[in-house]
Amino acid sequence: MNEVIQVIRQHRSIRKFKDSPLTGEQIEAIVDAAQMAPTSAHMQPFSIIGVTEQELRKKIAVHSNNPSIEKCGYFFIFCTDLHRMMLAAGPDQQEKMARNLSYSYFYQTAVLSAALALQNANVAAESMGLGAVIIGGINEALPALDEWLGLPDFVIPLAGLAVGVPDELPEQKPRLPQSAVFFENRYEDDLDLKAKVEEYDRGIEEYYASRTNNKQKVSWSGKFIAMLDKDMPLSGYTEYVKSKGFDLK
Ligand SMILES: Cc1cc2nc3c(=O)[nH]c(=O)nc-3n(C[C@H](O)[C@H](O)[C@H](O)COP(=O)(O)O)c2cc1C
């Protein structure tokens, strides 16, 4: 197994960090790795905001319900960003561009590209012996984050990345079997797929019951069925995305 795969295979999210800031070199290497990710049509539709002000980090941590934002060695926020392209255009071009950008296709490609940059950064951090956790919880701090970070239209915070020197080594979470996620030529038959998920559920129940921290009596599918069974107040998020210029047509 080569070194890149070894680093990827060692992944687990780290949420407890030593009180040790990242060096400028480490920050630069992580951002550089993020920028080398492939992007749709080379649009490079993302920005990364490093949050260094402790008060601001505390505020984001509280609103996002994620204490590691405040306690990590460095905190990045990955945003999808099509603002730069708009800036380069004249006013009548902008009007036409905004019409196209308002289709959900552009939102989807921009989010996908930003996500690849985020994971490049995550792997780069892990390859340097650092720990990291992606924090989607920052979405709970919307739309206030826009104001705190001064984000213009067409810039949407997607997720945070808390990075630092690990102060824990949690057990790795078992993944679904490859045969339940990788199919050749045709999607898996429902009966076979259901059986594989049931088998995985039994294994992950054991994992949650026996792990060192945060033991739970829950299966993988049970967790998400319980979550998605409830009414979730998500229309606010759609409205927020629309308010930033992505009409999601
Ligand atoms: C889009 C996304 C959002 C996430 N948001 C959070 C979060 O808000 N807080 C957190 O502690 N972990 C968060 N995580 C980390 C996941 O909980 C974690 O990756 C998953 O449970 C698998 O565990 P592992 O990364 O240790 O293998 C997020 C991961 C992703 C990809």
Image (cartoon, rainbow, N blue to C red):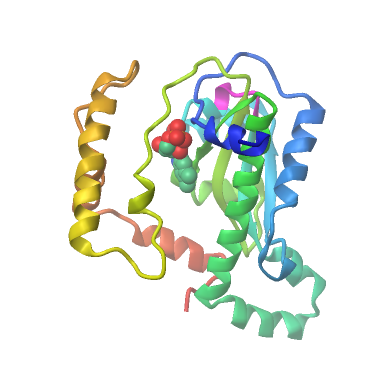
For the point 75% across and 69% down, which residue is it? Answer: 85
8 above or below 21? below
For the point 73% across and 71% down, which residue is it? Answer: 86
* Res 222 visible: no
* Res 115 visible: yes
Q: Looking at the rendering, in which quadrant would you find the N terminus? A: top right
137 above or below 37? above
Q: Is residue 23 left or right of residue 232?
A: right
Q: Is residue 73 magenta?
A: yes
Which quadrant of the figure shows ligand 1?
top left
* Nearer to the camera, 128 or 64: 128
For the point 50% across and 16% down, which residue is it? Answer: 168
23 above or below 50? above
Q: How many labels were placed on the picture?
A: 0
* Residue sitting at the far front: 1
Q: Is residue 206 left or right of residue 23?
A: left
Q: Is residue 115 magenta?
A: no
* Nearer to the camera, 89 or 170: 170
- Dividing the picture into quarters, in which one does residue 174 lie? top left
Please provide percent x and percent y for residue 129: 66, 24
Please provide percent x and percent y for residue 112: 56, 60
Q: Is residue 29 left or right of residue 174?
A: right
Range drawn in magenta: 70-74
Please provide percent x and percent y for residue 190: 21, 63
234 above or below 5? below
* Nearer to the camera, 43 or 173: 173
For the point 49% across and 49% down, which residue is it? Answer: 142
Please provide percent x and percent y for residue 118: 61, 46
